[in-house]
Amino acid sequence: MYKIIDGKAIAQSIRAEIREKVVTFKAETGCEIGLAVVLVGENPASQIYVRNKIKACEEVGIKSYAYYLSAAATQRELEDLLLSLAKDDEINGILVQLPLPTHLSDKALKLIPDCKDVDGFSEGNIGRLCLNLPATVACTPYGVMKILEYEHIEIKEKNAVVVGRSNIVGKPMAMLLMNADATVTVCHSKTKNLKEQCLKADILVSAIGKPKFITSDMIKEGAVVIDVGINRDENGRLCGDVDFESVKEKCSYITPVPGGVGPMTITMLMYNTYLAALRSRN
């Protein structure tokens, strides 16, 4: 018998915890917690993501600062803004909504100090994660770890397979699982015998970005299946990397799309921002 993991419910529970922590922080320090969100251009999807992040800030009591640059903004304008935010004591976290317009370089992100890098993308934070040192962790893989924790799913000594090796999800996901004492295999587009690798997984995390790519014949009986993918199927409906209807009958736990990992990403962004404020005061 499988269980469908309710990511929305877990996210709401964590947001309630964050809200309480933020109230306590304000009472003890007399200070707000501030998150700066930078959007360059008018990408419709990016605008939605930014609105959702601002809404989440309101929900947990974090003060949001939105900075909108035109699509014609120069590299210098973006870098000057980030340098200014880096020096601003009222800003605890900085994120730049990606992707940037094609004429801009994401090298500007290097101007965000590690201590304000609430996305967990900086070389410093990634390096500390690899060394199993305290670090700000990329929000989506951090959210996956929280899901496993809330569902009391044992990681230690399990075989974990991560399908996808992106810097944003796949690589930090593998590091987190390894740091939790799983034996981790990372698969990608050039992996030979992908099916055989997936069949070894006690925990399978798919972040490959291909609709319904993971099918039931790739899943071991009783595996935990975490679907990070957000795609559109042949009918234009939102779906994940996993063929949910066929896979669910073989697994012990599975995350749906939508409603699984997705709600956790912005929630962990809020948590990272709170942690950044806490570290700055300590």
Image: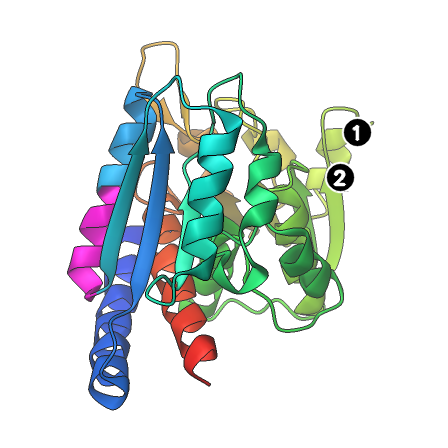
Please state which amino acid type lies under the numbered disc 2.
Gln
Q: Amino acid at mark 1?
A: Thr
Query: For residue 129: magenta?
Result: no
Q: Which SS does the magenta portion mostly show?
A: helix
Can you give x and y, in whole percent of width and height, for residue 223 in the image? 57, 51
* 88 is higher (above) or lower (below) than 232: below
Residue 117 is situated, as x and y percent measured from the top left of the image, at 51, 56
> Above or below — where is 162 with respect to 182?
above
Query: For mark 1, what is the residue?
Result: 191
Q: Residue furthest right?
A: 192
Q: Secondary structure at mark 1?
A: loop
The tag on residue 53 is none
Residue at point 26%, 65% (across, down): 15
Q: Position of residue 275 (x, y in %)?
A: 43, 72
Q: Nearer the viewer, residue 75 or 259?
A: 75
Q: Is residue 163 left or right of residue 1?
A: right
Query: Does residue 205 appear in this view?
Result: no
Scheme of image coloration = rainbow
How packed mark 2 is, by other alpha carbons closer than 10 Å (few <14, some 14-19, many 20 or more), is some
Residue range highlighted in magenta: 52-61
Quick one: 18 or 262, which is closer to the camera?
18
Sooner in the amino-acid sequence: mark 1 or mark 2: 1
Give the residue pinned by disc 2: 197
Q: Residue at x 51, y 39 (%)?
A: 79
Q: Are marks 1 and 2 in contact (CB under 8 Å)?
A: yes
**10 Å neighbourhood of mark 1: few (<14), some, or many (≥20)?**
few
Q: Secondary structure at mark 2?
A: helix
Looking at the rendered image, the disc whose residue lies closer to the viewer, 1 or 2, is 1
Mark 1 to mark 2: distance in Å?
9 Å
